[in-house]
Image (cartoon, rainbow, N blue to C red):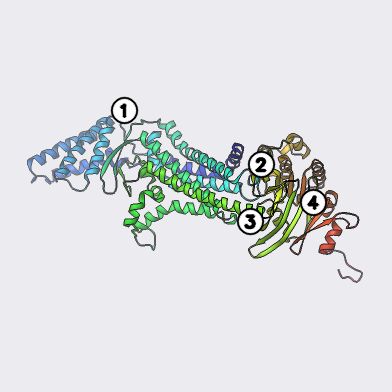
Amino acid sequence: MLRYMQALVKVMVKNPVLWLVILVCQLMLAAPFIKGDDTMGYFLGAEQLDTALRERRKSIEEGAYDSAPPEFREQMKEELSLMTRASLTDDPAEYARLRAQLLASDLESFRAGNLIGPTEKSLESEYQFFTLLSQQEDSRIFETYREAPALFYFAAAYSSLPLLMWVLPSVVLAVLLNRSVSGRCLLAQAPLGCFTAMAGQILVLSVLSVGAIILIALPSFIIPMLVNGFGEASYPVVNVLGEAQTAVREWSVGEIVPRALLMLLLAAMFSTLLTHAIARVVPRRILFVAPVTVCLLLAWPMVEAYMAMGSLPGVESVNNESAMLEVIAPYNPLSYLNDFMDVAGRANYWPNQVQLNDERLTLGLAAVVLLGWAFVALAIAFGAVAVRGRALARKDAHRPASSGSGMVVQGVLLSYGTHVVIDNASCELPPGTITGLIAPNGKGKTTLLEAMVALSGTRRAGSVHANGIASAQAAFRRLVLYVPCDAGLLYPNLSAADHIKLAAALWPDKVDTRKLIELCGLTGYLNKPVRAYSSGMKQQLALAVAYCTGVRYLVLDEPMNALDPGNVALNTYIMKRLALQGMSILLSSHILSNLDELCDTMLAIKDGSLIRAALDAESGGAREVYERLFGMPRTYGSEGKDGTP
């Protein structure tokens, strides 16, 4: 399984789409620092204090406090003195101490009923913040993000990037993985059991999701650190918890950063595993449903917030809260996706308030709920995979084959819905033989070949065995490989060398890959990505990869298409040599002359039935067999004596 996982990682990390999405997220997260955006620090900075000082002086000059009790007027003078000293000092620690004294006075006035406007908890949080700030070596208030050191910047800025963007690379990873193990590509045919393969996929997605979050966050540490240093881990953050402002909690940026990263990792793993689970359940043709569903789920909290505020055009303010929703909120993953920055905490200066919808939401419970729901979805996906596997196994068991050599197809019925393509198809491919498959276009050649190797869901009945091993078993894929005609076996972003190493690693039989590479003429192209190859080079590489697996049965769909005459002759030679060594090859083709040269016998699809035709002196060659079954191929461009075609 380790080699399978390594192959998955290579396929995904070499895809430029993943790196583009990560780069966009990195730039969005670093943008506040690059642009020098304001933090909320100006509410606590000297400029705001100067404004309050001018208003206080004006009120005293206008006699606003002349009728107040003497002790109150004395308190106003003391506060005016503190404000003046704080406004004039250049020492950040002294400024913080003076602001703490002013806030202590405000708290006393509030409790005495002489101050209205703020809440007690908001005043208490500011008092605690300035008290703790005055004890720091660096007691500055960072009024712009460009002033902030690395720890404070990330603790303040991580919540500026929507959660959807944080986890989008993880969703992309799940999509790329499912594309790489679906259809007719090489990893889709890897000789692993379904559950083993899926367990490997889950591990790979989990590890790469962690890596994606770290990569997104990395520039937001490095850039501020290079400019302003790492910062003090003890730099204070004080939050008021809950909409009801029931408590004040003291943090530090050193605590918030790991909490934020952990919360983001949990959200990323939830998103990627949920995407993967949905993709494993839905049919391959609607694979897009998985990422779309998860992205909508992640975006819903934002939409819901706008709806609650009445900010969406044409949508009235709504309030969906109910007693039942309040009870289940701690067990609802949407609760944590909505409040991800509040669950983790954030350095937000003002209003220093964590607006948790539910104060029961904690980071520990977030881990249990998000991962719990993800694994419930995966359990459903495992169940769906098991059901499909058992259905295929029942078809194979209905007509078992002997344990002898050969690939045996018995009573296969293929259909798309109610449209039957082939009915009751049976054939046997003995070792050391090459069998051709002919039929006009659209008669089911590709459908039959894919059904024989269990790569499509069109087989409604019948069994396929190789050396007595049923097609539903992992051991079957060690013996049989299918090569489609459109280079669908290959991955565009991998090189020829990557593909050949992958084939040699996943299939157990040892093959002299170096000799095959030289023989197939790939030496000069080994390190080029497949997307840079011509159609003929892709087809040649696909065949070379198939040879490198060392399987005992090759199923080839029009393998000579796009090949030049030299490569047609080369692959004809290789296939004959492999047949002499005991390999059995089934290939479809429209190049009838090549079938004459290669094949021992022929199969044909006519009127929905699979029939066998021998190639001998009595039956004639492939062209004669084709003409006898399907009529004379039409010719164009020659005219008779009377001018008619």
Percent position (x, y) of residue 70?
7, 41
Q: CA distance from mark 4 to mark 2?
A: 33 Å
Residue drawn at (41%, 44%), measured in percent from left and top?
368
Residue corresponding to mark 1: 137
Nearest the viewer among 576 and 70 is: 576
Q: Which mark is residue 419?
A: none
Number of the front mark, 4 or 2: 4
Q: What type is the residue that disc 3 sits on? A: Gly
Foreground: disc 2 or disc 3 = 3
**In the figure, residue 195 lies in which quadrant?**
top right
> Which residue corresponds to the image point at 32% horizontal and 48% vertical from the top-left?
358
Q: Earlier in the sequence, mark 2 or mark 3?
A: 3
Whether residue 91 is visible to the viewer of this picture, yes or no, is no
Q: Which mark, by number, is residue 457?
A: 3
Q: Report how far apart the C-alphas of labels 4 and 3 lie in the structure.
A: 24 Å
Type of amino acid under label 2: Pro
Of mark 4 and mark 3, the one earlier in the sequence is 4
What residue is disc 2 on?
529
Q: Secondary structure at mark 3?
A: loop
